[in-house]
Image: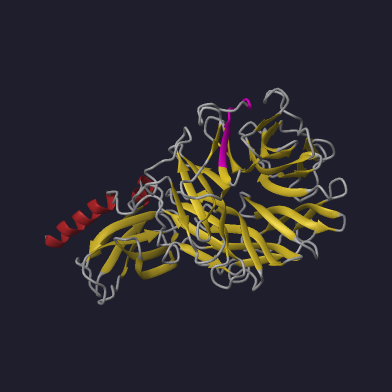
């Protein structure tokens, strides 16, 4: 009877949210301390620029790998616990040379069949040109796409063709956006990589801004097929620029009258990332005067005055003179997340959370922002994504170990809790016995779908003290397996964390 009662209490504990981790704290179930650095190709410059989460929870990071003057596209896929995925490329890593010079990957998109599209630019014989690579789900270039998985597009001699953002349309066609001296540029491709000449003019749409040129760094496709672009325009000064095209590549004149809009603060400003909120507003993040900046436009292309009174919010960080903004994401609550870097003793990862009106959310780390040092002199977060469980993932670069640059990854708690969300509770039940924990303890759990689980014991400060499973395959159904707790662990309260691609569950336990 006592065992049945204990089992019932533990199931109740599973359903509770345990407020044990402060919002903004590193998630120690990622590589034990919440951070990962990865040498992609035993080279000098491995820099992560783009981040995408797969539906199964695995993490894709794309960027550059190589040496100055001969950089290649580099892609790493991580398991949910931060280990490189051995089923992808070679030990989780892929490098692809487009041209003998520098090739830079800046964006990732996923197709419904699991194929991975990486977009950017390469150093072609006529200068920089658009570049796309399609990989299969295992990281092999797709021979049915372009030339051995690679597509390049030379625009107006190539010197102005810097590709920055890729998107996959519902019908399988592909958009790659960038720009240069002529303005924002977008090319549409058929699913096999050939240019779709029915789009724009012979496959190319250009949005010209007054001045010396413009670069689109981010792109989103609305439900109605219209294409939203964000970046910067160079005139007398550099300003945040947004534009919207119809699905055929023509300017949408219902957007700010001529299909384009700009926003300016004191000094130069540019947008590096963009997201559309549920009401269709356009939210961008970038830089202004050595600090991050967030701007928001209405669906009609007008600066949204509900953000900071004028639609633009310089994110001045108390005590930090130099900082940068690179990535943006929106939480389900509408709060705005900005990723970038902050110059302290060294340059560190930066993650800030703002309320909908642009003020700091002081429930996040007590200050509204957090910095993370990888022990290097320069750590920069260039992309951000939110997991299904709400945890926040940043990707970028660090020189923490070898003092060459490596891919860098960090994961943070978002809501100040390491408990069970509703989806996790619906997808899993678990119990541990006996309790308090011993070397002979077992865990019993039931999954409603196949998954790969990592099972860890975390102390009440958030540090991982013992790992029992790492990305181990478990079929749907009931499981009972050993939980051999280290007898040397001090007595006290711990959190048992079970994480998979479909679930995250945490139970408070005693030893």
- Does residue 110 sit above or below 243 in this rendering? below
- Does residue 267 sit above or below 392 in this rendering? above
Residue 462 placement (x, y as % from top left): 34, 61
Residue 86 placement (x, y as % from top left): 56, 69
What span is in magenta? Answer: 293-301
- Left or right: residue 210 versus residue 12 is right
- Left or right: residue 1 versus residue 491 is left
Residue 85 visible at all: no
The quadrant of the rendering that contains the N terminus is: bottom left
What color scheme is it?
Answer: secondary structure
Quadrant in which residue 378 is drawn: bottom right
- Left or right: residue 463 versus residue 193 is left
Residue 299 placement (x, y as % from top left): 60, 27
- Left or right: residue 290 versus residue 121 is left
Q: In the current view of this chain or complex, which residue is farthest to the left? A: 1
The quadrant of the rendering that contains the C terminus is: bottom left
How many dots with numbers? 0
Quadrant in which residue 494 is drawn: bottom left
Residue 310 visible at all: yes
Taking the spot 50% from the left edge, 31% from the top edge, the residue there is 308
Residue 130 placement (x, y as % from top left): 77, 51
Residue closest to the eye, 230 or 153? 230
Whether residue 40 appears in magenta in the rendering, the answer is no
Residue closest to the eye, 410 or 380? 380
- Does residue 315 sit above or below 107 in this rendering? above
Taking the spot 24% from the left edge, 53% from the top edge, the residue there is 13
Residue closest to the eye, 239 or 83? 239
Whether residue 300 appears in magenta in the rendering, the answer is yes
Taking the spot 43% from the left edge, 38% from the top edge, the residue there is 333
């Amino acid at each position: 009877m006592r065992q049945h009662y204990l089992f019932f209490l533990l199931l109740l504990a599973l359903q509770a949210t345990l407020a044990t981790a402060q919002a903004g704290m590193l998630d120690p179930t990622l590589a034990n301390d919440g951070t990962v650095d990865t040498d992609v190709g035993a080279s000098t410059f491995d820099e992560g620029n783009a981040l995408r989460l797969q539906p199964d929870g695995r993490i894709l990071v794309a960027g550059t790998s190589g040496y100055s003057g001969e950089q290649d596209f580099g892609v790493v896929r991580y398991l949910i616990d931060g280990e490189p995925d051995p089923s992808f490329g070679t030990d989780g890593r892929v490098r692809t040379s487009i041209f003998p010079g520098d090739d830079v990957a800046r964006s990732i998109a996923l197709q419904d069949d699991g194929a991975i599209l990486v977009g950017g630019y390469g150093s072609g014989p006529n200068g920089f040109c658009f570049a796309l690579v399609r990989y299969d789900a295992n990281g092999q270039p797709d021979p049915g796409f372009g030339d051995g998985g690679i597509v390049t597009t030379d625009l107006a001699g190539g010197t102005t063709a810097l590709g920055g953002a890729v998107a996959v349309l519902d019908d399988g066609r592909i958009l790659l956006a960038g720009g240069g001296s002529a303005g924002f540029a977008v090319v549409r491709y058929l699913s096999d990589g050939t240019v779709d000449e029915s789009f724009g003019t012979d496959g190319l749409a250009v949005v010209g801004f007054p001045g010396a040129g413009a670069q689109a760094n981010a792109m989103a496709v609305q439900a109605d097929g219209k294409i939203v672009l964000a970046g910067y325009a160079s005139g007398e000064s550099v300003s945040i620029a947004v534009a919207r095209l119809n699905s055929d590549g023509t300017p949408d004149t219902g957007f700010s009258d001529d299909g384009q809009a700009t926003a300016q603060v004191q000094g130069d400003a540019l947008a590096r990332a963009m997201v559309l909120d549920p009401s269709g507003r356009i939210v961008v993040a970038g830089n202004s005067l050595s600090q991050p900046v967030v701007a928001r436009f209405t669906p009609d292309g007008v600066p949204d005055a509900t953000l900071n009174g004028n639609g633009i919010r310089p994110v001045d960080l108390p005590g930090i003179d130099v900082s940068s903004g690179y990535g943006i994401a929106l939480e389900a609550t509408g709060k705005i997340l900005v990723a970038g870097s902050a110059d302290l003793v060294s340059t560190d990862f930066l993650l800030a959370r703002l309320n909908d009106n642009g003020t700091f959310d002081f429930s996040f780390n007590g200050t509204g922002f957090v910095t993370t040092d990888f022990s290097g002199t320069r750590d920069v977060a260039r992309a951000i994504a939110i997991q299904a469980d709400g945890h926040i993932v940043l990707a970028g670069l660090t020189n923490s170990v070898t003092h060459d640059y490596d891919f860098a990854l960090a994961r943070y708690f978002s809501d100040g809790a390491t408990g069970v969300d509703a989806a996790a509770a619906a997808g899993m039940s678990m119990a541990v016995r006996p309790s308090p924990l011993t070397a002979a303890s077992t865990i019993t759990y039931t999954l409603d779908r196949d998954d790969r689980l990592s099972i860890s014991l975390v102390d009440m400060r958030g540090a991982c003290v013992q790992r029992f499973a790492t990305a181990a395959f478990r079929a749907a159904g009931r499981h009972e397996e050993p939980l051999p707790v280290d007898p040397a662990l001090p007595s006290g309260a711990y959190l048992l964390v079970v994480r998979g691609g479909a679930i995250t569950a945490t139970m408070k336990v005693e030893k």
